[in-house]
Image (spheres, rainbow, N blue to C red):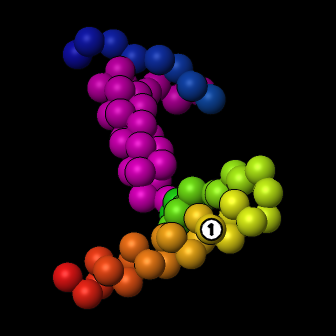
Amino acid sequence: MAGHYVIAGKKIPNHQLAMFFIGSYAVLGAWAALKPKAPQPATPPIQASSSDEEAFIREFLQKAEAEEKKN
């Protein structure tokens, strides 16, 4: 065989250590990929300089969405 390490008084073959670390990376990668993501807002925030401008933008977006649903 290729060799071994002595860990806690036991001989651990190199291939078992390699399989342990590869499995650990696979588990951590799967956990990172499958963990729930924070929900993203549907639209970006409106950064208007006044309340009138913000109201105009909201009204325009509502009209545009209504037209989109119509077509």
Most foreground residue, 22 or 43: 43
The picture quadrant where one finds residue 44 is: bottom right
Whether residue 33 is visible to the viewer of this picture, yes or no, is yes
The picture quadrant where one finds residue 9 is: top right
Residue under label 1, please give it: 56
**Above or below: residue 52 compared with residue 28:** below
The residue that appears at 74% across and 66% down in the rendered structure is: 52
The residue that appears at 30% across and 26% down in the rendered structure is: 15
The residue that appears at 41% across and 51% down in the rendered structure is: 33
Q: Find the magenta span and give its range.
A: 9-35
The N terminus lies in which quarter of the figure? top left
Report if residue 32 lies within the magenta region. yes
Which amino acid type is marked by label 1? Phe
The residue that appears at 26% across and 12% down in the rendered structure is: 2
Would residue 48 be found to the left or right of residue 44 on screen? right
Most foreground residue, 36 or 68: 68
Residue at the outermost right position:
50
Q: Position of residue 54 (x, y in %)?
A: 69, 64
The picture quadrant where one finds residue 29 is: top left
The C terminus lies in which quarter of the figure? bottom left
Q: Position of residue 45 (x, y in %)?
A: 64, 57
Most foreground residue, 20 or 27: 27
Q: Main secondary structure of the magenta part?
A: helix
**Above or below: residue 11 compared with residue 2:** below
Would residue 62 be found to the left or right of residue 15 on screen? right
Residue at the outermost top position:
2
Would residue 65 be found to the left or right of residue 51 on screen? left
Would residue 42 be found to the left or right of residue 8 on screen? left
* Numbered disc total: 1
In the structure shown, which secondary structural element does the residue marked by tag 1 occupy? helix
